[in-house]
Amino acid sequence: MNNDKLPSSNPEEDLATRFPTAYTILFFLIILVAALTWIVPAGQYERSMNEEVGREVAVPGTYQTVDPNPQGFVDVMLAPTAGFYDPDSYVANAIDVALFVLFLGGFLGVMNATGAIDTGIRSAMHRLEGREIWMIPILMTLFALGGTTYGMAEETLAFYAILIPVIISAGYDAVTGVAIILVGAGIGVLGSTINPFATVIAANAANTPFTDGIGLRFVLLIGGLIICAAYVMRYAHRVKADPSLSVVAKQRDAHRKLFLQGHDELENFDLTGTQKIALTIFALTFVVMIWGVSSQGWWMAQMGSLFFGAAIVIGLIARLGEKKLTGSFVDGARDLLGVALVVGLARGIVVVMEQGMIADTILHSAENTLGGLPELTFINLMFWIEVGMSFFVPSSSGLAVLSMPILAPLADFANVGRDLVVTAYQSANGLVNLINPTFAVVVGGLAIGRVSYDRWLAFIWPLLLILTVFITVVISVGAFL
């Protein structure tokens, strides 16, 4: 009997097969937002330059309806291209992120050509045997520190291809590797303390010192990190004990073949002198990247150039030769081309919303909803309004510039500190950006980790519920302090 046409006996496997890719999800979201521009009235606030923020911000009380600009078929088709570069947008463009991803892929391709990563992974697993579980809280803490101090987000894309093979070699799955990075940095951004791209910009736009409310944000950071690390460790422990409990169990063999690339069969744990030098340069590259972003104001162009230069240095030291060096770089960039395209698609959603002039209308509705509410109701409704807006404006700085000048002054009438509004905004944005399909960091990280969006939701939804309850309790207590 031919069973080729029989349906799968596993409904979960059928769902994973039928669930659309990130490209399809994002394109349908572009269509959905375009449809909303035909329904939601167009409107705009007047804007003025805020020197402290360094951008134009909305002026409270100046909202007015304008002639509609509904987005049609041509606009939808142009959105992915416009998503890469739109000079008039208040949200960061995607072209620099996409190019950074390609340079990163080339850098990793050159490193793989040296064989240093394969041998290094085997050596690390040999040394950590029996203690691998403690990698999870240590690494999540490091990523959380990056998130809370300088808003580590796009920079995390550089770590997936490095960390996931180590995690899979330790007996866990690709989702564990993705969670360490995405949830680790994400909880840091959710509990931002001195993050200039979230807390500082939002506080300046709200006309309140960014240090006000920092104690409550430390509670969110530390408590959230403990919750998230415990959740990921529990999941990883269960997966290692029984791989069938993995949410990507059906992809286990494919992931091992893809990420381990044969080094499971390597018996030699000893690195050559050249490989040790290559790994040293490899590590120093990331140290320099973090230093540049955190203290020198670097962004994607500088980081991309750093990885490009490091790839050349490593290729020369490893004596790869001109053809193998350039071929490895191009092959590595090709491997991440899909991620670069996802970045532009995600940004295209925001472009359609901006051109359809419905963002300010949504903000105006939130302004009317919040007026005159008691403290507890006000701050919790503020949180949920920011949750909704975060899906359309995933950028923490973009959402701060858009919403804080309008919504923060309403706190004065509700007898709530403006610093608590900033905390509610960053908590909402950080929470949503753990799953936001319009956020390039989410879809890009999942693409590199080869984890489908539905499988990620299956893993993270209980954690989202726990974090939502935790945030609600913290900001509710903050309203009465």
Image (spheres, rainbow, N blue to C red):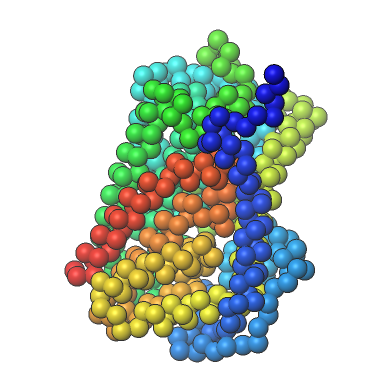
Q: Is residue 138 visible?
A: no
Quadrant location, the N terminus: top right
Vertical order, 245 against 412 (above or below): above
Residue 62 seen in this snapshot: yes
167 or 275, nearer to the observer:
167
**Residue 298 in the image, given as x and y percentages of width and height:** 56, 55
Asked whether 378 or 288 is in front, the reply is 378
Question: The C terminus is located in which quarter?
Answer: bottom left
| Residue in the foreground of this view, choosing between 268 and 418 | 418
431 with respect to 4 (left or right): left
Q: Where is residue 236 in the image (x, y as percent from the top left)?
A: 40, 31
Residue at 67 percent across and 41 percent down: it is 336
Q: Which residue, as the protein is rendered here, is positioned at the far top?
A: 267
Q: In this view, does 170 lie above or below 265?
A: below
The image quadrant that residue 39 belongs to is: bottom right
Question: How many labels sit on residues?
Answer: 0
- What residue appears at the point 66 percent right and 52 percent down from the top-left corner? 24
Where is residue 332? Give x, y as percent: 69, 36
What residue is shown at x 43% (from left), y 77% (from top)? 366
- Identify the residue at horizontal 58%, vertical 67% (top origin): 91
